[in-house]
Image (cartoon, rainbow, N blue to C red):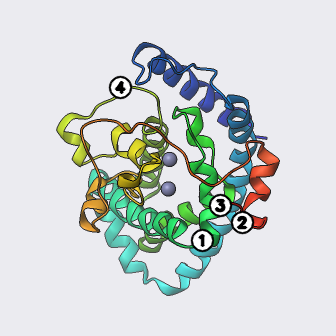
Amino acid sequence: MIGPVDLIQYLIVALVFVQLEMFFPLRTQQKTFRRHWRDDLVMLLVNGLVIQGGLVLSIGAMVSALHWAMPVQVSAFVKSQPLWLQIVEVMVLADLGFYAAHRMFHAVPFLWQFHAVHHSIEEMDWLASYRVHPLDQIVTKSASFLPVFALGFSDAAVFYFVLLFKWQSTAIHSNSRISLGPLRWLLASPLFHHWHHANQPEALDKNFAGQLPLLDWLFGTLFLPRQMPDHYGTDLKVPTRYDRQMLFPFLPRRG
Ligand SMILES: [Zn+2]
Ligand SMILES: [Zn+2]
């Protein structure tokens, strides 16, 4: 289970997003306690520690390997830049890693079975953003952090990036009418990511970026109409209980 500091963070996130979804809902019929909310809550509470543990191991191994490969002058130059510029660079590099790993999880059938757990969300909201298979998260986040640690950005830049990513990734799943106006082309919004979750042919394999739609535009996978999709999910029959979702990718593929 997660520790007390994480628990306080999650309570703040819950407080903010439950109210946002109550007062500015996208789908007014959708309830706060919608179907499978308990399963997603279990996922949030249990997964946090599993993912953190996996990332510590994976990032620890990357940092030790990169320590040998990267000249110290590179990190010294990177750290000498203004903090705001480092944060922007971290966002771009991390999202490139995220984009590549995310697209791979969609393209490789074995990996898709891990990522399908996330795509089994049929009612989008803030809590649903935590429905992820830990192996999916560990690999995708490691790919994000790889270029960041390789170049040796400052701890402050990484801290602000992580903070921004956490709030943005929860917001883009939320059942809220958050709209970024023309900034929707620059930053991932609910419109952008809800289409990634749409179970509609026109949205298949679109919008892979975590934060920057520009990457999808560059790689030809952007889909950003003005209206929201009609329905979400995947045709794969993903179980709803935590333990079964963990085992799902290792079971024979079902239709
Ligand atoms: Zn996906
Ligand atoms: Zn998502």
Q: Earlier in the sequence, mark 4 or mark 1?
A: 1
Q: How far is disc 3 from disc 4 in space, using C-alphas?
A: 29 Å
Residue position marked by numbered label 4 in the rendering: 177
Residue position marked by numbered label 2 in the rendering: 253
Residue 152 coordinates in the image, percent (x, y)? 44, 69
Residue at 69% across, 32% down = 36
- Under circle 4, the secondary element is loop
Q: Which of marks 3 and 1 is nearer the N terminus?
A: 1
Q: Residue furthest left?
A: 182
Q: How far is disc 4 from disc 1 in space, using C-alphas?
A: 34 Å
**In the displayed structure, would residue 69 be above or below residue 76?**
below
- Under circle 1, the secondary element is helix
Quarter of the picture containing the N terminus is: top right
Say which amino acid is labelled 3.
Phe
Say which amino acid is labelled 2.
Arg
Check disc 3: other Cα within 10 Å, few if <14, some if 14-19, many if 20+: many
Q: Which residue lies furthest to the top in this view?
A: 23
Say which amino acid is labelled 4.
Arg
The reply to whether discs 2 and 3 touch (Cβ–Cβ < 8 Å) is no
Residue position marked by numbered label 3 in the rendering: 114
